[in-house]
Structures are given as structure tokens and as C-alpha cells.
Amino acid sequence: MNNKRLILIVDDSPNNQRIIGSILSDNKYQLAYAAGGKEALDFVEKQIPDLILLDIMMPVIDGFVVKAKLNENPLYKEIPVIFITALEEPENKAKGFELGGRDYLVKPINKLEVLARVKSQLLIQDQKSELVKINNELQIANDTREKIFSVISHDLRTSIGNMRNVFRFMLDGMVDPVEDRDIIFDAEVTSRHTFNLLENLLYWAKSQQGNIKIYRENVDVDDAVNEVFDQEIGSATNKSIKLTKKIEKGLKLFGDRITLNIILRNLLINAIKFTPEEGDVEIIAKEINDGISIAIKDNGVGMSASDIEKILQKTEAFSKKGTNQERGTGLGLVIAGEFLELNNARIEITSKIDQGSEFTVIFPKADNTVESKGF
């Protein structure tokens, strides 16, 4: 792969091209040449250089016109340009900077000055690109946070409001704990959903502040899966979902057991949420070539390729209502993704609409130099 920085030298003098090219060739830049303004513009349309050294005094189309033409395209406008001139009049410099030129070189060219100015502009461009990337990531993160908080605030108001009404009706004698068990049952399901939402929110807030402490150790997979299984068997039973597990004997992975539990529990909750009543959800754990695989497989509603891409690329929080209209914020998958990274683990997703989904997390195998731990 060619990682050389591409520099376009634009000058109508072959002699000047040769001199500048000779100076820059020692520094392993990839060099391209244009003998005039039109040739330079044609070149940029085919390949965008990292930097342009642009002579001002050229026939037909001078350097100022070339830069003005580049400015008409938002993509070309951002190419750093160093003007080259034999004149040092303030008017020329002012015009160049007004057009967006980054720097000036005055003929006769000085080798050390050329090298220093080129290196400086490429460094500035790299820093600018990195800032743009960081700003884009921050914007995505802010958009995700706003969406999550919006859904969470709605969910909490609705859930707590419903439970409050049930308690009020019980106190007023309008709900009988024995005869109206379905109402009590719904309130219990709502309380479990609210508790999980608040727990996810707490861990997510800690992760955003960098306060999550990871302690990686050898973890017994059977114990880890059994704990999650026991935590959510009630949710599966409530929807008449058959929840099963298939775990190879003696499996041990290397990871943080607390965040492992949160990852598996959120994935299992999602599987139950998007599986209809009388459906099946299975947890399968086995050893593979590059780690320990734990898959949570369901025969639920499935997902489209675009939804899978959103989850894997973390472009936005993935949130949809479940088969029984269970609410969701998408926060569980966000947390799972962040915690997988902290554990040097990864996730793979396969799914077909109306046929089900399979979320597989792959953790490193146990480290034989570390003492094994159960849950």
C-alpha cells in the first residue's frame, strides 16, 4: 500500500518544477506536476492531492484563478495550497490569503524553507482531519445520547405512572390482589423492566465518565450462563417462551464477570422481547478457534440488514417495540457494545426477517497463567 503524501506542483516553468521536485523527492513524497492552471484543475478532478504548490504568475489561468476555481467545490476547497511567487508585494499575499491560501513561498526557492513549510502544512491538515473525525464522532454520540434520554424519560414516566396507579387503586380498594392478579402481574413486569432500564442507565453513565473498572479473570462459562438464565427465566415464562441452554463442559473465558453478565443479560432480554409467545430462545456456548463463543438464538421477528448494520457500526441507538409492545431504548445494545470492547471481545449478528436472530459474542479463551473464577 502506498502511504506517500501526494503533492501537486503547478508551475509553467519546467526548470522550477525540476528544482522543487528535486527538493521534495528526498523526503519520499509522491509528486505530480502540472504546467498550467487548466492542467492542474483537470488533475484534481481525477485525484485529490494532499497539498498543492501553486505558482501565481502563469499564462492563461494564473494561480489566483486556479484557487478560486477550486473554492467552487467544497471538497477541493479544503486542499491546502501554498502559493509560489517571484513577487513579494503585500497585495499578492493579501489576495492569496483571502482566497484561502495557507502559506507563501517566494522565488528563488530555499530548500530548507520549502521542506519546513510543506511539512508544516501537511501536519496542520492531518490535525484538521483528526479534529473533523473527532467532531463527527462526538456529534454521533450526542445524537445517540439525546435519543436515548428522550426515550428513557418517556419510558420512566409511563412505567412509574402505571405502577403508581396500580398501588393507588389497591389502596382505594378498586384492585383486589387475588381477583385482579393480571393487573398485579402487569405491574410486576413493568417494575422489572424499569429496574433493568435504571440499571442500564447507571452503568452507561459510568462508562461515559470512564468510571467502569474492568477486572479480567478466568470465568466459568457454565456459571455465567446459569446466572443470566436464572435472572431472566421469569420473563421467558411470562411470554410462554421455551428458554433452553447448551453449554460445552469445562468452558472458561478470560473477561470481566460483571460486564459479561450485563452483556449476556441485555442480549437475552432482547431475544425474549422480540420473540412471540410460544417461541424459543436458546443459549449456546462452545469453544471455537479464536475464543469462546456464546450465542443467544431466537425464532422471533428478525432484523433487516440495515438494522444489523446500525448495531454493528453504532451509528445510532437501535430501538423498537417488542412482540408484546414492550418498550425499549436501545441502551442495552449500546452498553453491550461498549463492554465488549473493554473485554477485547466482539459480537457477530445473523438474522432473517420473521425467522429469528442470533447474537454471538466471542471472548478470549481462559489465560492459563491466571487462577480460574466462578460466578
Image (spheres, helix red, strand yellow):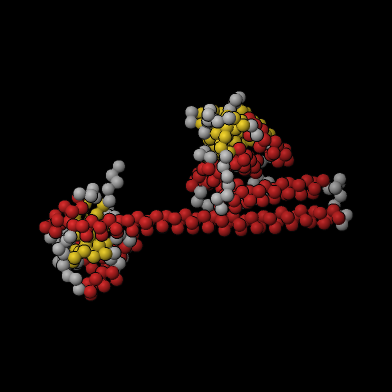
Can residue 163 be seen from the camera position used here?
Answer: yes
**Residue at 61% across / 31% down in the picture?**
373
- Which of the pair 214/235 is nearer the observer? 214
Question: Furthest-bottom residue in view?
Answer: 91
Look at the image and tell me in which quarter the C terminus lies: top right
As drawn, 71 above or below 318: below
Can residue 284 be seen from the camera position used here?
Answer: no
Question: Furthest-right residue in view?
Answer: 173
Looking at the image, residue 116 sits to the left or right of residue 187; the answer is: left
Looking at the image, residue 180 sits to the left or right of residue 159; the answer is: right
Looking at the image, residue 320 sits to the left or right of residue 313; the answer is: right
**Residue at 53% across / 40% down in the picture?**
343
**Residue at 37% across / 58% down in the picture?**
128
- Which of the pair 349/135 is nearer the observer? 135
Q: Position of residue 348 (x, y in %)?
A: 51, 38
Question: Furthest-left residue in view?
Answer: 15
Question: Furthest-top residue in view?
Answer: 249
Dividing the picture into quarters, in which one does residue 261 lie?
top right
Looking at the image, residue 168 sits to the left or right of residue 341; the answer is: right
Q: Position of residue 64 (x, y in %)?
A: 23, 68
As drawn, 35 above or below 182: below
Look at the image and tell me in which quarter the N terminus lies: top left
Q: Position of residue 364 (x, y in %)?
A: 52, 33
Q: Position of residue 291 (x, y in %)?
A: 51, 31
**Residue at 16% across / 67% down in the picture?**
86
The tally of labels here is 0
Dividing the picture into quarters, in which one does residue 97 lie?
bottom left
